[in-house]
Amino acid sequence: MEEVREFMHAPVISIDPQATAQEAATIMAEKGIGSLLIMKNDEYLGILTKTDLVKNVLAGGLDPQGTRVYSVMAKPIITLDHQAPKNEAIDLMVEKKIKHLAVTKHGEIVGVLSTTDIIGK
C-alpha cells in the first residue's frame, strides 16, 4: 500500500504572515512549488497556494506588492498523517475541494502533498 509520505515534499517551505503576495509568488516560482505554509513564532497559521494568489489577489484586483499573505491565506490547514494511504489523501482532497494537504507525523507538520505529487509518481 502506497503511503502519503512516499509522495510528499519535505522540508516544509514557509513564509511569515506579514510577507507580501509578491514575495510569496517569487518563492513559489524559485522553488517550483505550488504552496507555502504561513508560519509565525513556530506555529503554522494557514496555507497559501497559487490558486489563492490568482483568485484572491489578481482576480480580486489587489496589489501583490501591498497584499499581506495572512489576508489571503486559507485556514485552517487540512492535514493527514504521513502513514495514511494515498487513496485517503485523494478522497480528502476531493471532499474538501483542495489541491494541497499538510502531512503530519506525531501531530507535527513534516511535509506538503499536492495533487501533482500524487499524479506525477
Image (spheres, rainbow, N blue to C red):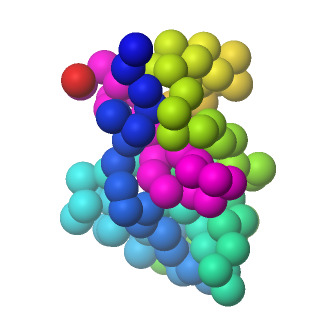
Does 14 sit above or below residue 66?
above
Region in magenta: 100-120
Q: Is residue 59 visible?
A: no
- The quarter of the rendered structure image containing the N terminus is top left
Q: Nearer the viewer, residue 73 or 38?
A: 38
Q: Is residue 88 visible?
A: yes
Q: x%, y% of residue 102?
A: 56, 46
Residue 109 in magenta?
yes
Q: Going by the image, does 108 lie left or right of 35?
A: right
Q: x%, y% of residue 95?
A: 69, 17
Does 25 sit above or below residue 107?
below
Picture residue at 62% right of the left edge, 59% below the top? 108
Give the residue at the far right of this rendering: 76
Q: x%, y% of residue 3?
A: 43, 27
Q: x%, y% of residue 90?
A: 52, 18
Give the residue at the far bottom of this rendering: 41
Picture residue at 37% right of the left edge, 62% below the top? 11
Q: Nearer the viewer, residue 64 or 81?
A: 81
- The quarter of the rendered structure image containing the C terminus is top left
Q: Going by the image, does 19 lie left or right of 76?
A: left
Q: Quadrant of residue 7?
A: top left
Picture residue at 51% right of the left edge, 74% below the top? 15
Q: Nearer the viewer, residue 28 or 42?
A: 42
Does 31 sit above or below residue 92?
below
